[in-house]
């Protein structure tokens, strides 16, 4: 797979993922003092989806690298976001909402990792692939 | 300029820049969690913090703000790869690295965002 094609599909995926995140943020706005539900849902859904994409296109032999680049690196990479998560956390701390900030971090990181873990496992089982011990 | 065009172009630039950094860093760190994604997420958190901080104390052109925040920083940084790496470390039972990687990414990102906001506000 040529490098140019890979960057091209990541660019297109980046457009689609960014658009989706932007429209969701506009449809479900969250004020700075409240729990950032919109970003949380975006990051959890994207983390669950990446588990499926990794098993379907990267774990298989031979791997489908271009499809993985488009869906995983492009769409899901751009749809989910780390910077909004950290800035929202910093803002919650700045307006003296430390408990909300801690809950937000724990649910995002723990929930995201758990979501990816479960979808990787379920997808492997569905494909009758060997599940790591 | 249309929001669709601004977010789309900046998002494409952000996503391809992320991949370029990831690829570049893989040459030096071929195994383990991606150092490139760590750098991207810390730098993006700092950058978004600066944009948000600047917007608190002064007028920032709406189109420029949309391009930098929702478009570039949003697409440049990523949560899904981080979550998948943590899931992989759980699978491999690399508990020590799991805790270390989570701490570096989350505390590093939080501090970068906090610093960015402070820098932007006092610019």
Image (cartoon, rainbow, N blue to C red):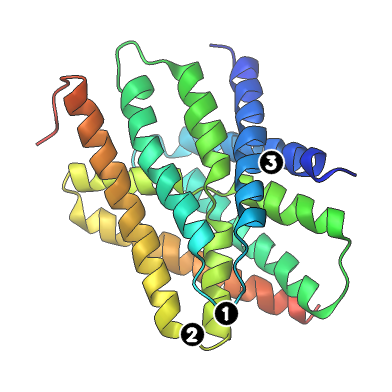
Above or below residue B90? Residue A54 is above
Q: Which residue lies under the disc numbered 2?
A: A97
Q: Which one is closest to the eye, mark 3 or mark 2?
A: 2
Distance from Cα at disc 1 to Cα at disc 2: 8 Å
Circle 3 marks a residue in which chain?
B
**Do the CB atoms of the residues marked 1 and 2 lie less than 8 Å apart?**
yes
- Relative placement, left or right, of B65 versus A118 is right
Above or below residue A127? Residue B14 is below
Q: Which residue lies under the disc numbered 3?
A: B11
| Residue A119 placement (x, y as % from top left) | 28, 38
Among the two numbered marks 1 and 2 on one chain, the one whose residue lies closer to the N terminus: 1
Q: Which residue lies under the disc numbered 1?
A: A33
Q: Which residue is painted at 55% across and 43% down in the image? A: A79
Distance from Cα at disc 3 to Cα at disc 1: 27 Å
Distance from Cα at disc 3 to Cα at disc 2: 31 Å
Above or below residue A117? Residue A32 is below
| Residue A124 placement (x, y as % from top left) | 21, 27
Circle 2 marks a residue in which chain?
A
For the C terminus of chain B, which image quadrant?
bottom right
Q: Which residue is painted at 32% across and 43% down in the image? A: A116
Residue B23 seen in this snapshot: no
Q: Which one is closest to the eye, mark 3 or mark 1?
A: 1
Q: Which one is closest to the eye, mark 1 or mark 2?
A: 1
| Residue A70 placement (x, y as % from top left) | 54, 25
- Relative placement, left or right, of A113 versus A78 is left
| Residue B39 placement (x, y as % from top left) | 54, 52
Return the residue nearer the eye: A101 or B99: A101
């Amino acid at each position: 797979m040529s490098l140019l094609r890979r960057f091209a599909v990541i660019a297109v995926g980046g457009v689609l993922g960014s658009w989706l995140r932007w429209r969701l943020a506009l449809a479900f706005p969250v004020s700075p003092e409240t729990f950032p539900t919109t970003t949380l849902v975006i990051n959890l859904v994207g983390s669950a989806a990446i588990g499926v994409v990794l098993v379907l296109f990267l774990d298989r032999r031979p791997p489908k690298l271009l499809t993985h680049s488009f869906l995983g690196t492009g769409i899901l990479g751009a749809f989910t976001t780390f910077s909004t998560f950290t800035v929202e956390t910093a803002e919650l701390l700045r307006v003296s909402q430390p408990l909300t900030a801690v809950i937000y971090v724990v649910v995002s990181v723990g929930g995201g990792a758990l979501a990816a873990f479960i979808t990787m496992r379920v997808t492997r089982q569905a494909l009758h692939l060997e599940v790591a011990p | 300029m249309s929001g669709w065009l601004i977010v789309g172009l900046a998002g494409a630039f952000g996503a391809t820049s992320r991949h370029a950094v990831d690829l570049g860093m893989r040459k030096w760190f071929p195994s383990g969690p991606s150092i490139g994604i760590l750098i991207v997420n810390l730098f993006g958190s700092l950058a978004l913090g600066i944009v948000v901080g600047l917007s608190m104390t002064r007028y920032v052109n709406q189109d420029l703000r949309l391009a930098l925040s929702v478009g570039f920083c949003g697409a440049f940084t990523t949560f899904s790869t981080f979550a998948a790496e943590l899931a992989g470390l759980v699978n491999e039972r690399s508990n020590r690295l799991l805790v270390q990687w989570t701490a570096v990414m989350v505390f590093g990102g939080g501090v970068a965002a906090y610093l960015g906001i402070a820098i932007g506000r006092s610019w």
